[in-house]
Amino acid sequence: MRTMWDEEFEVVIIGSGFAGLAAAIEARKYCDKVVVFEKMPVPGGNSSICGGIFSAAGTPLQAENGIEDSPALMLADMLASGQRFNYPELARMVAERSTETLLWTIEELDVKYQPSLSWVGGHSVPRSYNTWNASGSGIVKPMLAKCRELNIPVRLKSCLANFVDDGNNAIEGVEIREEYIFPKSESGTPKRIRATRAVVLASGGFSQDKEFRAIQNPRLTEDIESTNHQGATAESLISAIRAGATPVQLSNIQLGPWASRDEEGFGVGSLFSMLAGFPYGIIIDVSTGNRFVNEQSDRKLLVDSMLNLGTESIAIVDQKGVAYATTLDQCLKRGVVRKFDSIEELAASNHVPLMPLVNTIKSYNSSIEKGEDRFGKWIHKGLEPIQYPPYYSIRLLPKIHHCMGGIRINTLAQVIGIDTRRPIGRFYAAGEITGGIHGASRLGGNAVPECILFGRIAGANAAREPLRSGHPLSQE
Amino acid sequence: MRTMWDEEFEVVIIGSGFAGLAAAIEARKYCDKVVVFEKMPVPGGNSSICGGIFSAAGTPLQAENGIEDSPALMLADMLASGQRFNYPELARMVAERSTETLLWTIEELDVKYQPSLSWVGGHSVPRSYNTWNASGSGIVKPMLAKCRELNIPVRLKSCLANFVDDGNNAIEGVEIREEYIFPKSESGTPKRIRATRAVVLASGGFSQDKEFRAIQNPRLTEDIESTNHQGATAESLISAIRAGATPVQLSNIQLGPWASRDEEGFGVGSLFSMLAGFPYGIIIDVSTGNRFVNEQSDRKLLVDSMLNLGTESIAIVDQKGVAYATTLDQCLKRGVVRKFDSIEELAASNHVPLMPLVNTIKSYNSSIEKGEDRFGKWIHKGLEPIQYPPYYSIRLLPKIHHCMGGIRINTLAQVIGIDTRRPIGRFYAAGEITGGIHGASRLGGNAVPECILFGRIAGANAAREPLRSGHPLSQE
């Protein structure tokens, strides 16, 4: 008995975020019939709602600003933050090809970036570009436009139900539920889609799958918020594992330390903390008025410190530091960030004991003068004392942000089988669905280069697989 | 077409360590035909070569010695060491039923323990029994004797090749390779064994699977030694995942900080460090002569500190402290522990700078007098200054010891399916093959109660599954 197929493409891509769309655009260079399936009614997934930060080593903006950087330094930062759980060969690719990938978004997609670099926690130097609109949509929209230009259909409300193998350790296609209504697993109409060259899985992480994330890390209880869109669930990861993919490091799930307690999801406050509050301000324990951590630490270290406190924390920045915030107006408008003429007002409004806070700021300012901070924050020449009103504060709440774990790929973006420990035929993956690139903790702005780099690799390699000898559709 | 079966039992158990043998003994209470398959030519796996330490809260020896303890305190220790990656409901069962499980080994199996308790790192109080022979074989041998008494065959050189499901989300049997020669995957003769009630997987961890452990944690390179027997490989874990089991926390792999650089594997030195060197002595960096960690920390903290040093470390104990070592004679005989009449000789022989070492010991001794240690070691009344010759040293080498990750079970020891997120029918698991009980780091002596407790639960529940309506063997 032969499998019934309803439709046939050369390359079938699951997911329409950075990785999936990059795969589609690249695949189209080498073959004609490429399709993208997206389970949600809108394209883009988390990529559309993220902060649009792109970290890269050796960029034009770094050269303009006299910032010395190298892929080796970026890799060292990734391994340090990742506690060396990273696959070194994949992490190295991200570092070495980050600038090439950035330039591709500029040259091929005409993505617009802001004119200044950001310095994001855990990076040794400023190396992060920001999209013009401070959102990943600044990259996703040009990608979607490119797909239209290339006649690549992006089919929405089309949920992966299963991979179909050819009985010979290779993937031959997928079962899709069309007109699927998230999150109803039984909604929509099943259709079998054949891939005559290969399938690319780029379906993202599972930060919104409250049951599955707690299975992997029981500490991540239901009540913990997430920055992710509702569709970030685990069923495609599970389908991949059932199809023989190797699960790796699924319990490495990152919380973002910079999110706001006063809005849902990633919102506008996350970027405020990430770009201004942490690098140019301080984080304090509201119950004591004291600092407790190097604000420029990687995300895991920050979150662990905040959770160990057991109390609430806020970030504070002054008029000088706030200049680095790209989302200030929206933050103020939504009440996520509040503005005060004096530290006294800021303290009163945030219920922080005044004198300890004043002393904390004094001590921090004198660290900057001395050039040495007791929490190890690097005192660079761009760092100024907190002394110019108005002052700004944001109430912080760690939210689940990124799954470092996923399925194992190699440098060609091939999915590695758990039993054979070799590539599964005609099966590629890229982006947050893959695991082990960032290890224990991903650095800010490193997902975009990773997703786009491995998306492009997956798309190109998928499209260059030999064409399966065609048997007609719907044959039995 | 019906599956061909070569043989039929009521309960089929994979693995002959603590968990598998406990399952067999318990299953036999409720049904007649129980079998244990073991892939190696000898039974017992790691259970036979471990240190035979059994931690339990609220035991007779604690009562005799006036040590106050409770399951709640043991659970708190487990969650702290586990960084709350533990499944709390399973960890609680280990703590609450640890003493009941200890007493079962004494009353049902006639296991003999030493008359004094040990205080193992990360435990808040002394709560660890030691088998009479300072080895897990002190429990495995009585278990094997009980199996013989109960007519439970333990078939050696019989390797699990696959689980066979009944097409209805339940396991119906296994494919075994008989006369299997480890590690040749194609050796032996395939046989299909039906389980008319259930299958229990108790096949242990994968610390000796150099490829698979590096897939889960790339930092664990090939050259890192392991305390485990050669058969501790991942193929049965992979078979379980391919059969639909949920993988959890596979990258949580523990190194033992107490192993000796001067012998292979677990050896005799591990217990020396664990029972004497760490609780009653000090650990120093040989390059500086300084202490760098609370010697009574949990294993993960100790190993991380040792690896961060980047140099070698040794443990030192004096005549008083060495009294707690159960394996001293063997250690001295094998050159794993060396004995010196003076600190001068110890320093010279270990290439430690003398004066810093003398100062370190002075400072440690004065901590004991003051009742407060700068590294946070708890200064209890049993702790004495290091001052009575002869002195003993052991050269330490962290070795891979235990897989905290594995497949997910519930409180009934049922294996939970990854796609349904509910129990897979007639499929149980216990012991190191299961994941999430110990979280990020298992405490010393906690594997034995866990393996035996969940082994017994798995065996009892497997044996009480309704009998499958029999179809004869070899039917087509």
Image (cartoon, coloured by chain):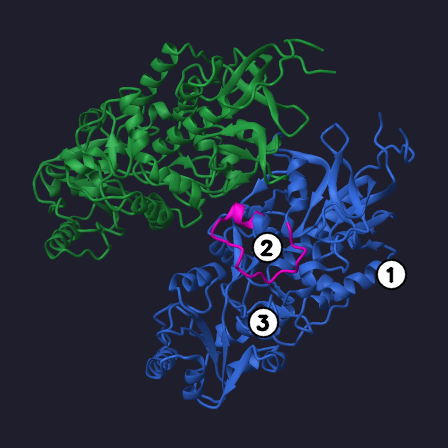
Chain colours: A blue, B green
Between disc 2 and disc 3, whose residue precedes? 2
Q: Which residue is mark 2?
A: A207
Q: Position of residue B327 (x, y in %)?
A: 21, 28
Residue A230 highlighted magenta (yes or no): yes
**In the image, are marks 2 and 3 on the same chain?**
yes
Q: Which residue is mark 3?
A: A263
**In the image, are marks 3 and 1 on the same chain?**
yes
Q: Position of residue B328 (x, y in %)?
A: 18, 29
Residue A419 visible? The answer is yes
Q: Are marks 3 and 1 in contact (CB under 8 Å)?
A: no
**Residue situated in front as seen by the camera: A471 or B211:** A471
Q: Which residue is mark 1?
A: A149
Q: Nearer the viewer, mark 2 or mark 3?
A: 3
Q: Is residue A294 left or right of residue B315?
A: right
Looking at the picture, which amino acid does disc 2 mark? Ser
In whole angstroms, how far apart are the C-alphas of marks 3 and 1? 37 Å
Q: Which residues are magenta?
A: A212-233
Looking at the picture, which amino acid does disc 1 mark? Glu
Between disc 1 and disc 2, whose residue precedes? 1
Residue B262 visible? The answer is no
**Main SS class of the magenta portion in the image:** loop
What secondary structure is found at the residue carrying circle 2?
loop
What secondary structure is found at the residue carrying circle 1?
helix
Q: Chain of mark 2?
A: A
Looking at the picture, which amino acid does disc 3 mark? Glu
Residue B225, image quadrant: top left
**Residue situated in front as seen by the camera: A92 or B293:** B293
Q: Chain of mark 1?
A: A
**In the image, are marks 1 and 2 on the same chain?**
yes
Between disc 3 and disc 1, whose residue precedes? 1
**Dot 1: within a 10 Å radius of its alpha carbon, few (fewer than 14), some, or many (20 or more) residues?**
few
